Amino acid sequence: MKKIGKGIGLSYYGTGYGNGFPDVSRAIIKLLPAGRIGIYCGVTEVGQGAKTSMRQIGAEVLDIDIENIDLVHEDTSLMPDSGTAAATRQTYNTGNAIKIACENMKKELLEKAKIELNLNSTSGLTLEKGEVILSFFPQKRISYKKLSEIYYNDVIIEAKGEFTAQTTEMDKETGQGAPYWPYTFNACAVEVEVDTETGIVNILKSTFAQDAGRAVNPMLLEGQMDGGFAMGLGYTLFEDLNLDKGIMKNNRFSKYLIPTAMDMVDINNIIVEDPEPTAPYGAKGIGEPVTIPIAPAILNAIYDAVGVRIKELPVTPEKLIKHLRGCKENR
C-alpha cells in the first residue's frame, strides 16, 4: 500500500566562526593594464559561486563590467588571507572586505583622476562604466584604461580592505550570549509517497524558502538550494556508511548510494530577501544552511504518511519496514 504524507522542516544558522573567535577577511584591489580591475583575496571556490559573486560586488562598487574584473584567489604569494571557505562566511565576510577595498580603491581613482584632469578637488567626480567623470561637466573624464597606462609601471593604483565580523563569546557560567552574526533562516516542505510493502520512500514535490539577505546572484542561489536539497535527500534516504566496529562496509559507490537526477524533483524555490544592514549590499551566505531543513521535512512527511517516527538515518527500505513491523507488533 502506498501512503502520502507531508512534512515541514525549519532551521536557522549562525554564519562565521562565532563565539568571539577572530573572523577576519582581507582583500587588495589593483588597477591592471587595459583598465582591468584585479581583486586579490583568499576566497576559495568550492562550488558556492565565489568566483562570480565576489566579482559582482567589486563591479557594483567600481561601476565596471564584471568581465573586466580578474579574481586572483588561489595563489598565496599574491593574495592576503581571507579565512577559510567554511561556516558559510565568505559572502558576508570576504564580500565585506572586497566592498571596503573597492570603496578605498574608488577614492584612489578619484585622487589620480583629479591630478590628470587638472582639478582642484575630487568633489563632483563619479565612477561610471569604467571612467572617472566630473558629473556637472562630463566633458572632463578619464578612463580606467588611460589611468592604467599612466600608473602601472612606477606607481600602481591599489587599495586594501579588511573586515572583522562581530561575534561575542558566550558566558561560560550561564551558556548565554549571541555567538554568531548574522543568522540565516529557511523552511522546506515536502510531500512523500511511502510504499508500506517495500519501504521505499519517493519525494513527490517540494517547496523550499531561503533567506538570503539580498540575492547577489539569484541563479547561483537557486543552484545552491537545489544542491542543498539533493545533499539533504541523500543524507536522509540513501547514504549509509554501514560502520561495523569502526570498519566502513559501504566503502565504494556500488554500495554507498547517492541521489541521482532521477531521484530529484522540481523544487519550488522561494528566495526571501530581507537585507542585512551589516552585509555587502545586504547579502548573507547560504552555503551550509540549505542542507539543514531537508531531513526534518522528509522525516516529518514519513511520520505523517505512516505514523512511524524515524530517528536514525538513513531511512533505508529495510529500516523503515522494520519500524513498520515493530509498530504493528506493539499495537
Image (cartoon, grey):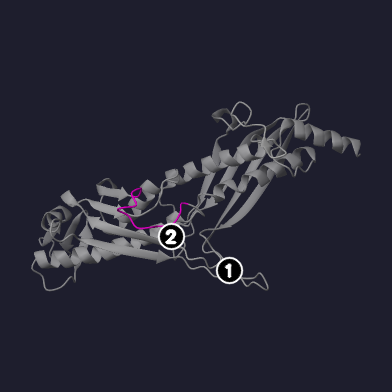
Residue picked out by circle 2:
93
CB under 8 Å between discs 2 and 1: no
Q: Based on the displayed image, in which of its 4 quarters is residue 280 positioned?
A: bottom left
Name which of mark 2 and mark 1 comes first in the sequence: 2
Type of the residue with mark 2: Asn
Residue 257, compared with residue 38, is above or below; it is above
- Tell me if mark 2 has few (under 14), some (14-19) or many (20+) residues whose alpha carbon lies within 10 angstroms of its own: many
Q: Based on the displayed image, in which of its 4 quarters is residue 130 positioned?
A: bottom left
Q: Based on the displayed image, in which of its 4 quarters is residue 26 positioned?
A: bottom left
Residue 255, compared with residue 213, is above or below; it is above
Can you say which quadrant of the picture contains the C terminus?
top right
Residue 239 shown left or right of residue 224 in the figure: right
Residue 149 shown left or right of residue 38 in the figure: left
Q: Residue at x 20, y 61 (%)?
A: 157
Which segment is the magenta one?
73-85
Q: Residue at x 13, y 67 (%)?
A: 114
Q: Position of residue 161 (x, y in %)?
A: 33, 64
